[in-house]
Image (cartoon, rainbow, N blue to C red):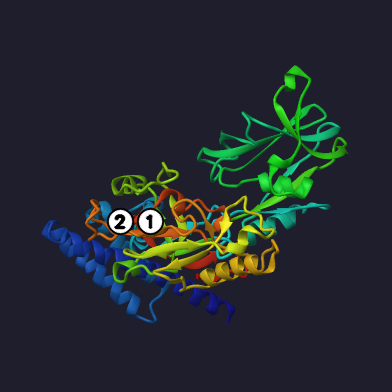
Amino acid sequence: MTVMNEDRRANRREKKGAKELLRIGLKVWFYRKDRLPPIEERALQIANQGLRDAIKTKAISSKELEKKARILDDALRKSGGHYYHKKNWVENVEMFLVAAIVILGIRSFFVQPFIIPTNSMYPSFYGMTPHVYEDETPNFLERGADKLLLGASHYRMEAESSGTLYLVLQNGSSHRYVQANFPNGRFFIIPTMVREYVFEIGGKEHSIKVPAEFDMDELLSKKFAGIENLRDLPMVIAQDESLSRGRLKLSERKFVKGEIPLAFDVLLGDALFVDRMSYNFITPKAGDPIVFRTASIDRFNYELGTKTFSQIGEDKYYIKRLVGEPGDKLEMRVPESIFTNGTDVRKGVPGILFRNGQHINGCNAFEQNRKQTNFFAESFKDELISGYPGYRADGLLSNRSILKVPHKNDSDNPTGLNGYFAMGDNSTDSLDGRAWGFVPENELVGRALFVYYPFTQRWGLSE
């Protein structure tokens, strides 16, 4: 009984291989029958038919099936051309090329993956965010799990000498941009720009390199001083000529050699799919979380004569909230009591956004930002109630100034293109249309559709 089962299994495997050989044989005959000499074409046809009949015969022996397969194999070797016999690596390359073409087609016309680097849309979407460890740091397995589920990259600084902790300023800045090569480059292969922070402990310098989009200033301020701005820390000038650069004293505590003054994870920003298809059939609407390219934004606003406050100067993908459609009139109104309460206005004066004379609506972010500004005006407290900081009157949307979004039919629009106005939900930390102006319609990529990674409560359809 066991021998019979083995024979059946072997026969099934051989039939599977014979079917694959027949598939190739029929393919070769179909593509080359007009170019083959009559004798070879006839031999190939007979070999194909012989193997096909053998496969259909239920009681055929393995030996007979192998004989028919060898006849077809010999015929293919003579007349198969570049279709036969192919090496496995050639077939694999073809498979990968076809897969790549399919993926590129999907990316170009349907959905495109996009990773959010900054927190300009927080808390609707997360950019790279830190998780600081105060006591115990994660072990190898815990770091692996965090990497898999949250896209977390772990950073730690171990004191190589004993002393006070300082942040060394570099040309007056908290950091500098340097190029990272293997193994710290993008995907460990492609050189990429990173931020380098240099610390000093007991006269010895230590450095940490983080992604260029990750701003570590607030992390350092909150961890070591409980404040939000590094500029509020005391400046210390070193007496030693070898350490003549300015330094910020981060802590009064004396760290000992081998201690870990700083350990944290950088959690990957939300990875989402962008719907590239819909805007081919419907117009973008206020409230949409839109992704767009920045390549021609500076030129577009220059031709419009927009009095911008900054330029982008590079071609990148941005994600912002669409707040103004072509022809809309936008206005930021600051409640009078904002100026008399305890609101911290260093990041802009809170205001309420109006669209065409009405409170802007169309998504939860609009409502939450309006509620936050009203809370500032009515409670005389400087605290957040939902994570949204309230829109800020700044730049092109300063208090009570009306901003018209360009329409392609406007007499003063020489571009012939519609414009759109976009802002970040996290208005206090967003460089958006208030600074660099309008987005031309040809730069719109699509609407944020679905957050597919990391696996958090934000996983799912985008809002």
Q: In which quarter of the image is the N terminus?
A: bottom right
Where is residue 350 shown, x and y percent of the image? Answer: 57, 60
Where is residue 288 shown, x and y percent of the image? Answer: 43, 68
* Vertical relation: 54 (above or below) 195: below
Residue to which mark 2 is pinned = 442
Q: Do the residues labelled 2 and 1 touch (CB within 8 Å)?
A: no
Q: What residue type is labelled 1?
A: Ala
Tag 1: Cα neighbours inside 10 Å, few (<14), some, or many (≥20)? few
* Vertical relation: 432 (above or below) 72: above
Classify residue 349 by image quadrant: bottom right
Q: Residue at x 65, y 59 (%)?
A: 340
Where is residue 6 shown, x and y percent of the image? Answer: 54, 74
**Can see residue 454?**
no
Q: How many dots with numbers?
A: 2
As drawn, the label of residue 285 is none
As drawn, the label of residue 100 is 1
